Image (cartoon, grey):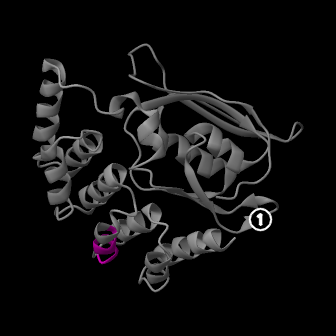
Amino acid sequence: MRFAGSMVLLVGIVFQVVHAEDKPSIMVRLDREARVWQLQAKSVSLPAILGELQRVSGMAIHYSVLPPASVTATCAAEKLPALLKCLLGESSGLVFGQADAAEPKEVWILGSTAAGQASDCPAVAAAVPQTPSTRQDNAELYAGVQSADPRRRAEALYALAANDDKEAEAMLRDAMSDASALVRGQAIGGWVRRHGAEAAEGELQQAMSDVDAAVRMQAIELTDSPDLLSQGLHDSDAMVRQLAKAKLDELVH
């Protein structure tokens, strides 16, 4: 990935449970005298933070499903790409569109349901030995997958993707055919997280044929396959085509 050259001045991000005494707050500003972007957030969801960053900076930010945990973060950087890396972590995959006055006009946060954020969020850390409490937690997640609420199904699948048991694997597989595009996108993200994009190329190909553009966008986010990205260039949705082109350009350069 290419990032604009800049110095991150201060980094800090904590995923946490929101307590009643924590008053949520977000501040995003450009200190024009110091020429530094500043971001401060307390007990706020990532979508809310990204929404405020988009509003203040004018940079369009595209992503799929992000972790549900609230975030406390303090970041400062000379350029928007570095500010995003501060917020999301060094391992986050970012693809930037055309730049305007040395700042990008838009950015895609890649694989947001599968990679970077999952490793940063304690709630979905690597699988641990099955104690009675974790078995109970898994039972609750399995029940969540059967919920009538698509958002709850998606959240349960997000957490189950970290489990290495066969039942979780089967649920991810079945969810790729869920009636909800949100759930289908989460399922393919979890599958890639477990198996890797190369091993999941067949599943990604299936997602590329999904009727919902959001699921096709998720497939483009998760793959680096030139064949699948080239297929995305001819998608009926303009956003899918733009992301496919941006990622192909990244591969070439």
Relative horizontal placement of residue 183, taking residue 7 as reference (left or right): left
Of the residues shown, which amino acid type is indicated by label 1? Asp
Residue at which label 1 appears:
100
Query: Which is nearer the eye, 89 or 59?
Result: 89
Query: Which is nearer the eye, 177 or 51?
Result: 177
Relative horizontal placement of residue 168, taking residue 213 as reference (left or right): left
Q: Position of residue 7 (x, y in %)?
A: 79, 40
Give the total of numbered labels.
Answer: 1
Q: Magenta stretch containing residue 110, yes or no? A: no
Secondary structure mostly seen in magenta is helix
Magenta residues, as a range? 204-209
Q: Position of residue 11 (x, y in %)?
A: 66, 30
What is the quadrant of residue 125 in the picture? top left
Query: Which is nearer the eye, 116 or 235?
Result: 116
Q: Residue at x 26, y 55 (%)?
A: 187
Q: Position of residue 88 (x, y in %)?
A: 56, 41
Q: Residue at x 63, y 45 (%)?
A: 84
Q: Magenta stretch containing residue 208, yes or no? A: yes
Q: Quadrant of the N terminus?
A: bottom right
What is the quadrant of residue 32 in the picture? top right
Query: Which is nearer the eye, 88 or 33?
Result: 88
Label 1 secondary element? strand
Up the image or down, 109 lies above or below 116; here it is: below
What is the quadrant of residue 152 in the picture? top left
Up the image or down, 181 lies above or below 50; here it is: below
